[in-house]
Image (cartoon, grey):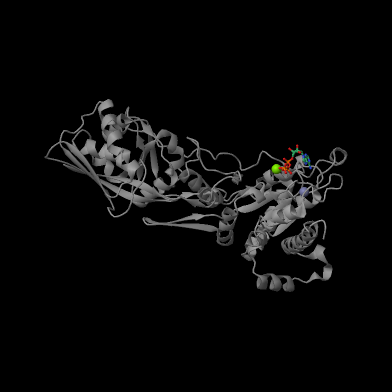
Amino acid sequence: MLSRVRTAALWGLEAFPVECEIDVGPGLPGFILVGLPDASAREARERVWPALRNAGFQVPDRRVTVNLAPAERRKEGSSMDLAVALGVLCATSQAPAARLDHAAAVGEVALDGGLRPVRGTLSLAEAAWRTGAQTLLCAAPAAPEAALVEGLAVHAVASLEEAVHWLRGADLPRQSPASPDDEGGSTFDLADVRGQAVARRALEIAAAGGHHALLVGPPGAGKSMLAQRMPGILPPLRPEEALVVTRLHSAAGLRLPGRGLMRARPFRAPHHSLSRPALIGGGSPPRPGEISLAHHGVLFLDELSEFARSSLDALRAPLETGSVWIARVSGVACFPASALLIGAMNPCRCGWLGHPKRGCKCTPTELQHYAARVSGPVLDRLDLQVEVPALTSGELLASEPGEPSARVRERVVAARSVQSARGTLNALLTNRELRELSRSIQPAGGWSSMPWTVAACRLARSIGRCVSRARSQIWRPKNE
Ligand SMILES: Nc1ncnc2c1ncn2[C@@H]1O[C@H](COP(=O)(O)OP(=O)(O)OP(=O)(O)O)[C@@H](O)[C@H]1O
Ligand SMILES: [Mg+2]
Ligand SMILES: [Zn+2]
């Protein structure tokens, strides 16, 4: 007997529809799985057979052939387990197949007949919706995420037994999408940062115009502290952005069970020892790297000078295009990678170059080597390069608490709305556009009469230029 069950398989960030055809026919008992399954998909039999037995169903004593269509496309993962199990039950007349005509099933089967959630549930549910399925059966922890697909009726099933109950006509409640993870706020507030007016201003301009930034300063100056507060001043994620971010984090297996839409902007701060594929993305099948996990959020590279040069150089293309393409024999995967890059580093190896009280102990050669650790083209992409001076304890105590993130965010939102009405983010303006834009704005009334965004953009460039000039002077070897 033949049965068909709709399911889906993940490839990179996107999933594609898979039709699972199961034939139980005469011949010696056996199981053949075709349709280019990878190792984890091929192990379906080792999971499904014990699961059927332990859930009290009969394991077929005939020849079972499973075809994962389209047969020429490679499939990875255990998302098709549930479809294989239900298909076998229908093909051996242990369950009626009628309800499967308009349904799809995704999930990994546990040996006791239970169901486990899989990576990329949101993408898988979207692919199931594209097959025309109106209902989706999936493991309970993944159901709130799957229910984000509008129109799709999601039923959470805890086990094979429960899925078969549903096939036999039992009613299951329709899962409603979980409430968003949070309201998109950040736990870190700029009000905690005292002083540092220039760095705060630079971060605000970076947030408003989408500029990448570099913070240079001695140990303990507050660079990490400032960078952590960046997501809190960026505008809240729009619903369509939140969906992409959720899809990415789910495909990378970073979602906690039972969570809904991700509303907070991601903040990724990978350690400098990470490999190039971990930063950019890679592997087979392709997985998103840190730059993609920071999409629509902030990628903070602390101790920038300690990152392998090849890793940093590989960031150049994604920073330019906002996406990462990973080509494999089995296909090409594209991950979005439009993140705000914030780098932080000390001014020299010992960290105290330019400090008013503590002397730098680096030799001229060490200074030169240090300055050359981040390549020019990477530095070029960091529009804002600001010095973060170390404040003395007296200065820290004397300065007032800073402006809270919420107030800064209001200005950033206002600046972004002007830019979106114009169509281009400040950081993405070409030189010609920038020239034309600034010419079209009459500075007769001075800087104060200028739209905030253009003023910010100009300021960004001039701060960038001043700081690079200052840095080139600071970084000149002592004995020159
Ligand atoms: N401007 C500031 N206002 C309030 N606290 C500050 C400020 N600057 C530094 N601090 C305090 O100093 C601590 C160290 O700061 P932080 O870790 O951000 O320094 P850093 O510049 O990243 O240093 P490193 O180069 O060693 O990584 C912070 O956790 C904070 O408590
Ligand atoms: Mg730090
Ligand atoms: Zn030094």
Q: Residue at x 43, y 37 (%)?
A: 142
Question: Closer to the camera, 368 or 186?
Answer: 368
Task: Mark yes or no: residue 320 visible.
Answer: yes
Q: Quadrant of the N terminus?
A: top left
Q: Nearer the viewer, residue 273 or 370?
A: 370
Q: Position of residue 272 (x, y in %)?
A: 61, 46
Left or right, 263 with respect to 462, comes to left
Q: Is residue 105 visible?
A: no
Q: Position of residue 138 (x, y in %)?
A: 37, 38
Looking at this view, is 402 or 363 the one in front?
363
What residue sits 57% from the left and 56% below the top? 315
- Name above or below for residue 306 compared with residue 92: below
Pick the front one: 98 or 203: 203
Q: x and y percent of residue 469 in the render?
A: 78, 62
* Image coordinates for residue 258, horizontal then vertical, percent: 48, 35
Looking at the image, how many numbered discs can be counted on the residues?
A: 0
- Please identify the quarter of the rendering in which residue 2 is found: top left
